[in-house]
Image (cartoon, rainbow, N blue to C red):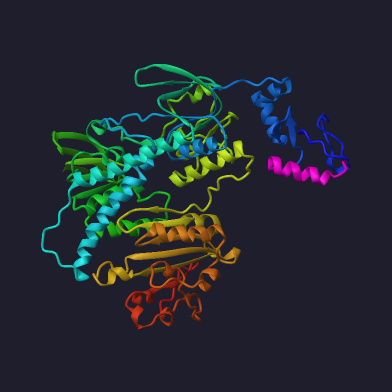
Amino acid sequence: MPPVENDTGKTDYSSVGSVYMLVLQDGTNYQEMLLQMTGQKTVPNVFINKTHIGGCDKTMQAHKDGSLQQLLSGEKENYDYDLIVIGGGSGGLACSKEAAGLGKKVMVLDYVVPTPKGTTWGLGGTCVNVGCIPKKLMHQTALLSTALKDARKFGWEFDEKVKHNWDTMKTAINDYIGSLNWGYRVALRDKEVMSMHMQSLLSHTKLRYATNKRGKETFYTSERFVLATGERPRYLGIPGDKEYCITSDDLFYLPHCPGKTLVIGASYVALECGGFLAGLGLDVTVMVRSILLRGFDQDMANRAGEYMEGHGVKFLRQYVPTKIEELEAGTPGRLKVTAKSTETDEIFEGEYNTVLIAVGRDACTDKIGLDKAGVKVNAKNGKIPVNDEEQTNVPHIHAIGDILEGKWELTPVAIQAGKLLARRLYAGSKLKCDYVNVPTTVFTPLEYGSCGLSEERALELYGEENLEIYHSQFWPLEFTVPGRDNNKSYAKIICNKLDNERVIGFHYLGPNAGEVTQGFGAAIKCGVTKELLDVTIGIHPTCAEVILLSVWCDCVNCTSVNIWPYFDSCYQTFLITQISLHHINAASSSFCPL
């Protein structure tokens, strides 16, 4: 056990090999002291040579990785660093800064492999440079186009022709991203984290080497490693894809307007990019192999797609590309796309200025020496299986972020996992990252936010007879004066009847979906039920309150919602279409509109 300070009138147990608290005078006090020191409530609570090991599982783990023998022999291996983080994205930076803040010597190794078009970027990973941040800003650019059209209906008068300048937008966004890159470097420097732009490779379980741009190899050792290398866009593997196409890694740094664009894929990246490009006034077609937003609620996905289609985005469904050819070089040039139907023998040919591939992403785990380090990797997708503490099969190597098997590929998840991992490793914390009920938003032209289970997954897990699904179309107040998109917005909650109608799925399609979903995500995390939503007073007038507005009526097979008592005359215009709000009986799929 750990050394115990001498206390007048008490026995000194600092040299005792083991102490049984139940027979020790003031044993309860010692238990409380150990809890404060280690954060561990259970026994055994093992210390060796004044170093806390943990319980039985941790002791056996230390035995397997050799650290137990080192502690017993009094030997302690010297390392260059306490922690080396491979990957300078959101998760890696969060983990490294947290560990450094806890007094550990930390290094971050980050290297961006240029795209086939030569695009590269600075510190911060996908989210900051070629993902969430520039995507949201370009999405906002497209929303401003709609706002300009709406403005005339609200009395704003302007005669000059409004047009969009791609270069101005790109420069402004890139400048902002550059400031973020610099901010990350300053933050690492302030935390005394060594940051190096180097390719890295695990040469064995304890040793690393890195190679800089000049090819110089440098060896580093570390007690622990965290893998946070993220993912990169997947290519099609057809003639001309890497030669002539771009991905989201290139789009946000494209020096010219992409012009007429074909987006290949139906992922959230595909729909987001296709949506904001169309919002800028470009001719956009989305080529879909099968379904939209695989893994998301398909009812919601199709509604988001229908909205896009109604606002100028063309969809070419059940087709896959077979080759891309260059017809004319330029900025942009002209490309010929050949595709085949997945259902018939029909062949499609079309000409576009730009072809954007967005068919998924691959984990960046194949070139960092994981095989030499003994880290298990799923050979099919490159993902790394970990336990509930983000630990790989090699005890001193952890992994976080998009490269984890079966986990969310989201920036906030990687950040949370990185912070909590560092606290467990170096601060005695026991808190683990919770990957259940993670809220997220797809920034399509009409935004889609969700938290919890899709309807398909809920039916699979609980069965129709055990679910109640409440849903509503609605007309946001800000859309009424311009007179657009009546009844296109939609909300749905999925409730488990076996658990007091606890909300197990939340889905919202409408303005400001991220802001709406974040709040309900917290409620779902707390176990909110339909009854609690019913008694919650909404903020008026907002879109979010549509989730809360319901009054029961007495129907034989189902329950309808009467919204009229909630609104005075000033508000009836906003949600007059709420009269279609109803409560589905999932088992019979019946409903009773008012």
Q: Quadrant of the C terminus?
A: bottom left
> What is the residue that sits farthest to the top in this orientation?
216
Q: Residue at x 50, y 42 (%)?
A: 406
The answer to whether 584 appears left or right of 529 in the picture is left
Q: Position of residue 196 (x, y in %)?
A: 42, 27
The answer to whether 307 appears left or right of 458 in the picture is left
Q: Residue at x 45, y 73 (%)?
A: 549
Q: Is residue 34 magenta?
A: yes
Residue sitting nearer the eye, 377 or 534: 534
Q: Position of residue 178 (x, y in %)?
A: 32, 39
Main secondary structure found in the magenta portion: helix
> What is the residue that sits farthest to the left in this orientation?
160
Report if residue 359 is visible in the image: no
The answer to whether 544 appears left or right of 554 in the picture is left
The answer to whether 579 appears left or right of 435 in the picture is left
Report if residue 251 is visible in the image: yes
Range of residues picked out in magenta: 24-42
Q: Residue at x 24, y 62 (%)?
A: 147
Residue sitting nearer the eye, 582 or 97: 97
Q: Position of residue 313 (x, y in %)?
A: 23, 54
